[in-house]
Image (cartoon, rainbow, N blue to C red):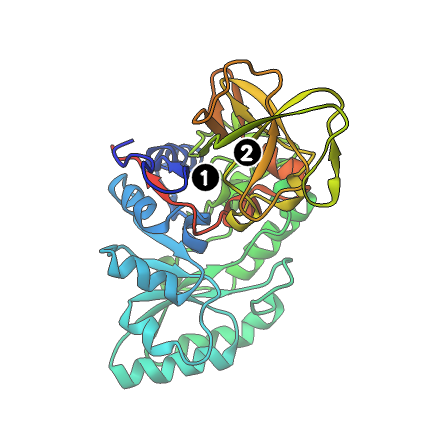
Amino acid sequence: MNNPPPTVGRPTWLEIDPQGVVANYRLAKQRVGASVAVYPVVKADGYGLGALPLSQALVKAGAKGLCVGLVEEGAQLRQGGISVPLVLFAGLTPGVERLIIDLDLTPFLYDLQTAHSLSREAVACKRQVPCYVKVNTGMGRIGFPPEQLATLLPTLQALPGLQLLGIVSHLACSDEGEEGRVTSTQIRQFNQALTLLKGENSRKYHHSLANSGGTLYHPDSHFDWVRPGIMLYGASPAFPHRNDQEEGLVSVVRWLSRVIQIRSFPAGTPLGYGHTFTTQKKSLIAQIPVGYGDGYARRLGNLAHVLIAGREAPVVGRVCMDLISVDVTDIPTVEVGSLVTLLGEDGTKRITIEDMARWLETIPYEVICALGKRVPRYHSRS
């Protein structure tokens, strides 16, 4: 690491590899081919891993645009020097029209009221605002009903100050893999919506439907540009049916800490809040300075394990806000200061965000988005 881990204060930190994200971006480009643009999704602070340094690496690697969820996220990237187009997913809410214009964001239009508001502000600023028309092809969230486009499109195209770039939608079930029937239906409905853009001007439009799942499993969903998200951060969009290695993805994050105390307890000793764990034999219990205050979920108590000296050490008792207890009885080399891997590799063993998602009965997205802000992030430099 060019940025070293902490030498003062609590020894718990994240090591993030922007080049791993770049490698996964290049896999997405390989899957879609040279004629399809890839706009990486870096919303939610790069899925919790640091939007600005990851965006800088992606732009350096050739990304022609990025996707954010909120105006504030776009502002952060602009302030950090990112100048490529920034597509705004669902952040066109009342009152942010001027910010969208000033930050040169490209929003999705998903209702007439916000479209008219943005048009009025664009006219007042004497600007042309690029934007996409969002249609709902099966997700059931924001977006115009496709059957209304025939009457809505002329209205949207006529609004002054707005430059319509194309039509977009979002896949609801692309995590089902290659055989997803819902995805096939959505692709068909999306193609039907595109037929409404007729004539000579239709050639200027660029359409988008695919997320990570569409990028990897559904070539018919690629259209002009794709929006991969979770695959960039090292997890399969088809989890739990497929994993990162099966997709050819690179791991990008390690969550590390160090042992701060080791104590011996006799058999029959209850440990931690609620006494949910009792030693069955004489045991060595190590304390690790991380807890649910850092995003290490409380549910992982008596369920997860960490890695120490290339060995698995089970988490015992309840996860506290600032500490976890692990059983190191079978790791003879452990000592105060020993490195602890919460996520990532140690020797031949590894714990992936998919592993943690499986323990928590959730998805990898939530695991990394929940990583606490008080855990310092160190990004390697190429």
Q: Nearer the viewer, mark 2 or mark 1?
A: 2
Q: How many marks do you count on the picture?
A: 2
Image coordinates of residue 273 in percent, x first then y, are 69, 45
Give 322 or 348, whichever is nearer the viewer: 322
* 105 with respect to 139 (left or right): left
How many residues crowd mark 2 within 10 Å: few (<14), some (14–19), many (20+)? some
Identify the mark at residue 67; answer none if there is no mark: none
User: Would residue 155 be visible to someone looking at this image?
Assistant: no
Instruction: Please tell me which residue is depicted at 66% across the width and 38% down the height of the picture.
Output: 301
Which residue corresponds to mark 1?
A: 233
Give 247 or 190, whichever is nearer the viewer: 247
Residue 25's quadrant in the figure?
A: top left
SS under mark 1: helix
Q: Amino acid at mark 1?
A: Tyr
- The answer to whether residue 266 is above or below residue 303 is above
Image coordinates of residue 221 in percent, x first then y, are 53, 45
User: Would residue 124 be visible to someone looking at this image?
Assistant: yes
Which residue is outermost to the top? 332
* 194 with respect to 24 (left or right): right
Instruction: Please tell me which residue is depicted at 64% across the width and 47% down the height of the picture.
Output: 173
Q: Amino acid at mark 2?
A: Gln
- The answer to whether residue 143 is above or below residue 67 is below
SS under mark 2: strand
Which image quarter is the N terminus in?
Answer: top left
Image coordinates of residue 139 in percent, x first then y, are 63, 58
Which residue corresponds to mark 2?
A: 287
Tell me how far mark 2 sits from mark 1, CA to CA.
29 Å
Image coordinates of residue 374 in percent, x first then y, are 43, 50
